[in-house]
Amino acid sequence: MTKSDVVQDTQKLLNDEQGVRWDATRIEAYILEGIRVLYARKPHAAYVTAVVVTCPSDVSGIRDEYRTALAQYTAARCLMEDSADANNTALAGQYLALSGLGPMAG
């Protein structure tokens, strides 16, 4: 999996495949945030590359099976920018729930 793969997956979820509404730079920032959240919740999502495992700084350190979850989380974060729109807020909540990376129940 590459960062470009996750950007494209996210743009498809957002129905913005040309990057008109959310450009790649903004999406990439949310991808990095998603990597940190994913690693905090599921450390086994990272490839073990040494005796000590640290949070990956790029998608290349994340197992491929988490690609969809990372794209869903990223799409949710993009949609949250327009929280005044009830439809975007609802869709963001759905993507966050599907990703498994939403707020933890306390």
Image (tube, rainbow, N blue to C red):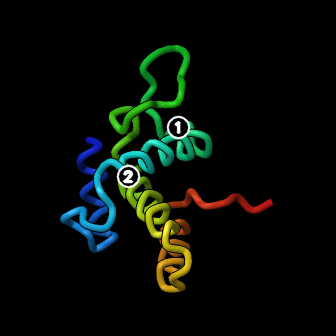
| Nearer the observer, 69 or 11 | 11
Determine whether the residue tagged by mark 1 lies in a helix, strand or loop: helix
Give the answer, above or below, for where 33 lies relative to 91: above
Q: Which residue is mark 2?
A: 26
The quadrant of the rendering that contains the C terminus is bottom right
Relative to residue 76, is residue 105 drawn left or right? right
In front: label 1 or label 2: 2
Q: Position of residue 95 (x, y in %)?
A: 48, 69
Dot placed on the residue nearer the N-terminal end, 1 or 2: 2
Q: How many marks?
A: 2
State which quadrant residue 8 falls in. bottom left
Residue 5, disc: none
Q: Which residue is mark 1?
A: 44
Crowd tier of the residue under label 1, counting other residues whose Cα lies within 10 Å: few below 14, some 14–19, many 20 or above: few
What's the residue type where badge 2 is placed? Arg
- Residue shown at 54%/85% (left/top)? 86
- Residue shown at 31%/67% (left/top)? 21
Q: Position of residue 97 (x, y in %)?
A: 55, 68
